[in-house]
Image (cartoon, rainbow, N blue to C red):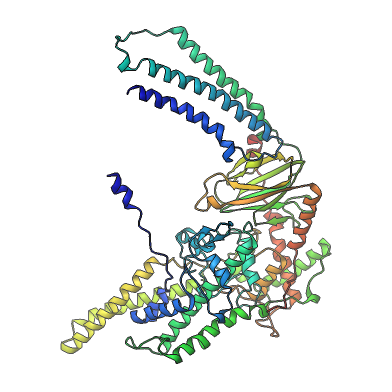
Amino acid sequence: MISTVGLAGCAESDPPAFRLDMTNVVAKQIAPDHQKAIANILGAMFGTPDKPFALPETGLDQRKLTMSAGPVWSDEQGGKHGLYRRHCAHCHGISGDGLGPTAAILNPFPRDYRSGVFKFKSTYKPAEPTDDDLRRIIHDGIPGTAMPSFALLPPDEVAALVEYVKYLSMRGQMETALVNFVFEEGYEPEDPLDPSADAELKNIIVNDLLADVVEGWHTAGEQIIVPDESAIPPADRTPEQIAESAAKGRELFYSATKGNCMQCHGPTGLGDGQQTDFDDWSKAKNEFISDTRSLNDEIQELKQGLSQLKGEEREAAKAELRQKGQELAERSALVDHMLPPRNAIPRNLRDGSYRGGRRPIDIFWRVWAGIPGMPMPGVGPVSEGAQGTLTQEEIWQIVDYVQSLPFERVNQPQHRPVNVEVVN
Amino acid sequence: MKRFWALVFLSVPVFGVLTFVVAPYFNHWFPQDISEHGRVIDQLFMFILWLTGIIFVATEGALFYFAWKYDARSNREPVKFSHGDHTLEVVWTILPAVTLLFIAIYQMNAWADAKMRKPDIPVTAEITGRQFNWDVRYPGPDGEMHTPDDIVRVDGDIHFPSGEEVLLVIKSADVLHSFFLPNLRMKQDVVPGMEQYMWFKARETGRFDIVCAELCGWGHYKMKGRATFEPRSEFNAWLGEKLTEQQTRTVAVSDAE
């Protein structure tokens, strides 16, 4: 009996593998053979969770990827490996899809890197984050969410994790590009999809699709929003001057033509202006769910009409029903297992918690560019040289107002001396 | 072979004492103590350890002695019954009661110093525990909490001045946590809705752990921070640095591409 117990638990489990985004794959009705082919292409371009590599076009540092990837272990000098799995994978998932084992219990859900969209960065809205942006998020964490600070990690480990996040992001974006390519080119299920046998396909994949993905990352450094020196308020302002600027910011905040912030952030800045909007990730899920419902309705209609058909028409309708039924089963399984879509609740500006950073420059960036993936719009120019809704001086005034909100009398924490006196 | 069990019982105090003797050589003993108050806590610990240790060894020794002497195989005499000894019963009830009472009273001062005699000094910092991070808020140049010049840090890197009394307010942002500084022998459960006070005086400088000592969720094991103790001048300089950083309105753009 002891030997039975002893021998039962020693089998090694399979190494983890990347997963495709099945929601996208099923929505675009990619045939199973093409799904395998796409997975193979991605494997050839990016490797596995244990052994990653990146093509030179991506510009990623292989040494950092090796440090981050694979199982958790330490070498003889104490150098740590498997950093991603040690620190990140339980929320962000092996594929960077935000579907790790602890993701379902969190609010907000962890970031899904695969779209290449990151909320808190220093660049224009459509651009990718810089390495420094990612490093800052890992270092400071995101207060108000379950993303903790990793300031206690040595800088080289943080840098390795930044590289791995970019790697997962590029891989996810490449996967979407491949799926869209197969869909848009109208590949039939029996058409081959093998770049090793088709030079033109390989050329398209590397020099078109991958190049588009990588371009965004390589040009992020040029897309940083740099405030004009002349517009930045001086560091030695008196409290009266700051209050004056905040008062102007208040006007802009509540003006419907200027900042129009109160539309979402509410008439008192509590984030209750509207709470029914969704972020992009949830919008995609909502679309998938509603398409699944429509499919179900279609199937019900077909079933009802079936009794009136005869012969060949009836056979054809039954075949269509079978096919649609199969698709519905796949879709329903995905809907049951996906993390539910959630409303994007605008920030309560009176509690002093700022997710993307509390420095004036951080809030300046949020107001200028908005928050990508979220309904928060920007009021600054959308790219260099363009015209924005507000000037830079006006944006700094809004920053002053927002920073003053938690300190208004009404927001000061109420002290409860009774408990404290009795206890200690 | 019945005496085998007597020997098994003997092994308990033997290995027990051996473990404590050998533990410091494997670094399985007290972490370094850098506080004024920690000495008292450690002394109390050692006192109770010695007291209970000696009594433990004595009682286990008595157990071994009786198990050995009266084991069935080597003892063929019939059992003798006794109606008990009233004096013995009274003695071995009163003695432990007095001992326990002594321990309870002996530690009251240490407890009061750590938990009840709050020093009348301004608050050095307000620590907020949240899942799964320690955030800190310093009063800033105006010396008052919850004003616009507060220094707020969310990266778990908390600095304190050494060589002076430090008063902390500890709050929770969500669930139960416990702010534990092992190297100062100070621990305070953080209860949501309550503001707890903690005070201590560090004798030395250096960087030490902050850990969470109350299960708070899946990330409890990694809810760590680092407490840095430095002289007041360096502490003020650090605060100044963080205040400036908190007011950043510019961004450094590297020309390297």
Q: Is residue B239 above or below residue A280?
A: above
Direction left: furthest residue: A311
Residue at image location 53% in from the left, 79% down from the top: A55
Name the quadrant of the N terminus of chain B: top left
Q: Position of residue B200 (x, y in %)?
A: 70, 39
Describe residue B164's horizontal placement relative to residue A320 as left or right: right
* Number of numbered discs visible in the structure rendering: 0
In this view, A163 is above or below B58: below
Residue under the image location 65 percent in, 41 percent down: B183
Q: Position of residue A196 (x, y in %)?
A: 42, 86
Horizontal side of A406 relative to A373 (left or right) equals: right
Quadrant of the snapshot with the C terminus of chain B: bottom right
| Picture coordinates of residue A296, whole percent (x, y) | 31, 75
Quarter of the figure with residue A62? bottom right
Taking depth in this image into account, of A278 and A369 the one nearest to the observer is A369
Asked which quadrant contains residue B246, the reply is bottom right
- The location of residue A242, given as percent across then percent down, is 79, 64
Q: Is residue B18 above or below residue A85?
A: above
Which residue occupies the foreground of this view, B253 or A24?
Answer: B253
Q: Is residue A286 left or right of residue A368?
A: left
Which one is in front, A35 or B52? B52
Against B59, residue A338 (above or below) is: below
Q: Quadrant of residue A148?
A: bottom right
Q: Residue furthest bottom?
A: A200
Q: Is residue A355 visible?
A: no
Residue drawn at the location 37% of the way across and 70% of the way down:
A334
| Residue A345 visible within the image | yes
